[in-house]
Amino acid sequence: MLKISPSPHIHDNVSAHRLMRDVIIALMPALLVSTYYFGLRILIVTVVSILTCVALEYFLGKYALKSKSTIGDLSAVVTGLILAFNLPPTLPLGMVVLGAVFAIGVVKISFGGLGCNPFNPAIVGRIFLLISFPKEMTTWVKAEGFNTAWSLPADTASLDAVTGATPLGIIKGAMAAGKDLTEVFAQNDFNYLEMLFGKIGGSFGEISIIALLIGFAYMLIRRVISWHMPVYIFATVIVFSGILWFVNPARYSDPLFQLLTGGLMLGSIFMATDYVTSPMTKKGMLIFGVGIGLLTIIIRTWGSYPEGISFAILIMNAFVPLINRYVKPKRFGEVVKNG
Amino acid sequence: MGSTILVTVIMLVALGVVLAIILYLVAQKFKVYEDPRIDEVEAILPGANCGGCGFAGCRALAEALVKSNDMTSLYCPVGGNATMRATAKILGGEAQTKDPMIAAVRCNGTCENRPRTNQFEGAVSCAVMAATYGGETACTYGCLGRGDCVVSCPFDAIHMNPATDLPEVDEEKCTACGNCVKACPKIIIELRKKGPKGKRIFVSCINKDKGGIAKKACDVACISCSKCFKTCPYEAITVANNLAYIDFTKCKLCRKCVEVCPTGSIHEIHFPPRVKKEEIGITEN
Amino acid sequence: MLKTFKLGGIHPADNKMAALMPIEDIAPEGKVQIFVSQHLGAPAEPIVAKGDTVKVGQLIAKSTGFVSANIHSSVSGTIASIDSIPDHLGIRRTAITITVEGDEWLKTIDRSKEIKHNITITPQEIIAKITEAGIVGLGGAAFPTHVKLSVPQGKKAETLLINGAECEPYLTSDYRVMMEYSEELLIGVLILKKALNVPKVYIGIEVNKQDAINKLKGLQSKHQGIEIVPLKMKYPQGGEKQLIKAIINREVPSGSLPIDVGAIVHNVGTAYAVYEAVQKNKPLIENILTITGKNVKEQKNLNVRVGTPLSSVLQKYGGLPKNTGKIILGGPMMGKAISNLDAPTQKSTSAILIMPQLEASRPKPSTCIRCSRCVSVCPMGLEPYLLIRLAERKMYDDLEKNLAHDCIECGCCIYSCPANLSLLDYIRLGKTEVLKIRRSRK
């Protein structure tokens, strides 16, 4: 029997499943680097987070939304993975589960599931944990070298790792104490090259800039995301913090430091670009990106938390419906250019 | 300690009073006079906001009823005569009385009667399908079976029968609001008189092709043979564009047309079973 | 840097498998069925009756208005009936059925292969001849050509663009015309140029047809005022507005026609038909038809008479391949899936594309993940994800505000939607409604 459908009759065979799979692949280099530095416990945290997200998506989708199961498109896996990346390596597993439950249950499913949530589930999950467990969420292990430990932090002693503040935390403390930042930088001797490769304390997915950039490149090649949003965020951060730093290097950190530390890379490449919670048009992406960049630096400099990217993304998420409503794509024939 | 609480309470109460006064003044200043009868009428109306009356919702109809001096041009098909009488009591006008109506699906092209020749795979929507091509069968007039009428019904009164792939109207629930009539791109559904005890007769086909072509496409199509037209004692039947149509205002439910129709495209509903003259002597299997 | 349009667009695999097959003539046999409406606009009025004998090229139905076109007999024989028959979509329309008897052409038609270079007649005469020959746009929409050539008062044609982009995958008929009738085509273009009295003509060809570009460039010097423009491969480059943007970098504003920016676009197939009509007195009675598809054994480019049943053309080459899932008239992006194989070809039929079962099914739709791919591929700068929501809810005012009526129905949105939503299906409905509302307002 012949099949009939309106045109077009071909499809590029890119499914939501394939896009999400590519995001997962793009996150793998960062996961490997983290495992190298923080030990195999990273993998346990990751697996727990993913399993909780997927299980919750399945059961809530089935019994609460009563809709077709959406776990096949892997979006819950991506949420679980990114949530785990935003956690410190030492976080107790119970808290990981709690974060995942909040991310999927409250932020995603309660708004209607895939495609309907206004906020990025992983980010809200992380912020929920940060506010609920400020101590555990800011206990950082410094990445030193290859690590094979299975359990943390009960077994901290057996590690080659020392707990300590992240570079952003150190700077924040110094700024709060009114110290001259040029001196603090000189004392701490931050090695930007080591930061690039992930030898730095922090949430475990955010540490290696190189690994994240590899993921970015992979996603660009596979056309999963466009370059616009991350680049807009980077550019805004560099320009804005550059101006501040130029005006007074004793009060403000330099742009390269801002770019290489904390979750900026992870946030702008993998979390700001989340399809559901980002604008639909290129112009909208510009507003969104610049907003995130500005807010990140503002929170990092004047806020009470050392890191601001997740708050920045969350705040801008709230503006997305507004941006989509008022920022329209460039229409064909809008500007009549004759010649 | 005690004074702090006291001061707080006094402050809040004072604040509340001041704001209440402001609110009252503002409400007075911007008060819009509304005929209280609008609310009364709206309370009587069914509240389904189906749009069957031609207005945006029950409130809009209530406003129109109250404003107009003459009620006869306005009618709520859902509430029916009882509602209109109650409305008339409030407004003091003359209520319009109409025969109760029901949606009739004028297609009997089940999978057996009307074999499929192709399979549609676009969006699940009759409107999309009708805009795309002639349809899954050789009949280009009949039901497309994608359920636009089901979606349009605010009363959950029309459903697809999976066995026949045709919509079926739930007589208990149907209010003759007419939404399905508007939703059907093929204009298959028609509002017809419900009839005494639900008895009604209609031509369940709208195929305007010539007899041979229609019959080839569908076993139960109207082939415009005009037998019903000739049989009808009340001139209720017209045949135009290769299609018979029964005017329900003239039909006296004599059932003669049903007997003569060679393809069985005229349907009778809620009639007692006939005395089977012809079938006497035929063994039932 | 190769020229192309700027906004949106996609790059489907071009699959031009029939590109190397030369055009073969198919002799008419049995019967042909010629619809009286094969164009946009009013149907033609039959001027023959049952039992009449006709010759090839004889007028059998006369145009009934300005936007309408003459219909000519494509065979010689006897009129068997004038009745409604189902077309390729199963919808019944009036057609003239002719029983083929021999192949006798009207004496006025010059059937020699000799190429006639000199354009001797005036622009008015050219347009009259084109009107007489019933030529319609062969790019797909079948808009009567003489209407496009009659520039409305107050407007001025500055540039003529010839569409040789053939950006749809699988299609090769324009390419074959450019390769096999290069000279005739260029003369046809010059005729159009003369009729419009424009100084410059551009022929836009996508670079996957390098042979055609080279061949036409080689002949360019002989024909003054024609420039061949190689274009970057991108769908929908053949769209009128996209082609104008690509070649002369002008944008047709929303709700306007190409003539409003001084441009007129014709297809290469049309230009060839114009050559035949003006220089050879031959009306539009044949079309170049590609038979192609992934499991089609013999890829073909055929020259068939208008009105030949599709099934008989297919039968000649072994019928339908096994596991045929879908048959499309035209390309895979904008062609129409057909339900009736017995339907005849029409003037603008350019290809029969046969899709295997596996490829034919549309993937099941899931949920919109707001990936914004549809927005970035839309060549008109619209927001398909928003339009489908508005169209599903019948919010026509908002649809108009969001320019649903600008949609060119290219299908890029469905092509690239990872959730397989039926974006265009609903947008098309909404667009039709919006256009109705806009027309009623005028």
Image (cartoon, helix red, strand yellow):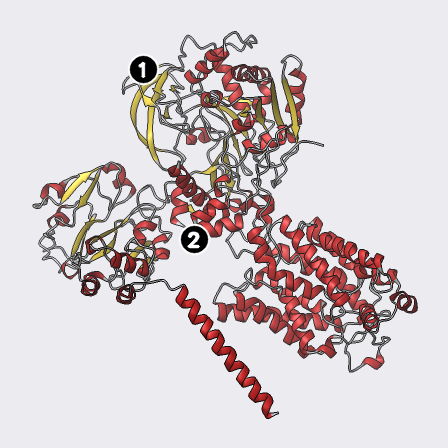
Q: Chain of mark 2?
A: C
Q: Nearer the viewer, residue B71 or B148?
A: B71
Do discs 2 and 1 share a chain?
yes
Q: Secondary structure at mark 2?
A: loop
Seen in the image, is A321 located left or right of residue A172? left
Position above or below: A267 against B54 = below
Tag 1 subunit? C
Number of other residues with Cα within 10 Å of mark 1, as a class: few under 14, some 14 to 19, many 20 or more: some
Give the position of the N terminus of chain C as an image quadrant.
top right
Asked whether C177 or B154 is in front, the reply is B154
Q: Which residue is mark 1?
A: C53
Q: Which mark is residue C393?
A: 2
| Furthest-bottom residue in this view | B2
Q: Position of residue C126 (x, y in %)?
A: 48, 13
Q: Dividing the picture into quarters, in which one does residue A149 lie?
A: bottom right
**Residue A177 placement: quadrant:** bottom right
Query: What amino acid type is highlighted by mark number 1?
Result: Thr
Helix, strand or loop at label 1? It is strand
Please provide percent x and percent y for residue A280.
60, 52
Q: Residue at x 56, y 25 (%)?
A: C263
Above or below, comparing residue B129 to residue B84 in the picture: above
Image point 46% across, 24% down: which residue? C136
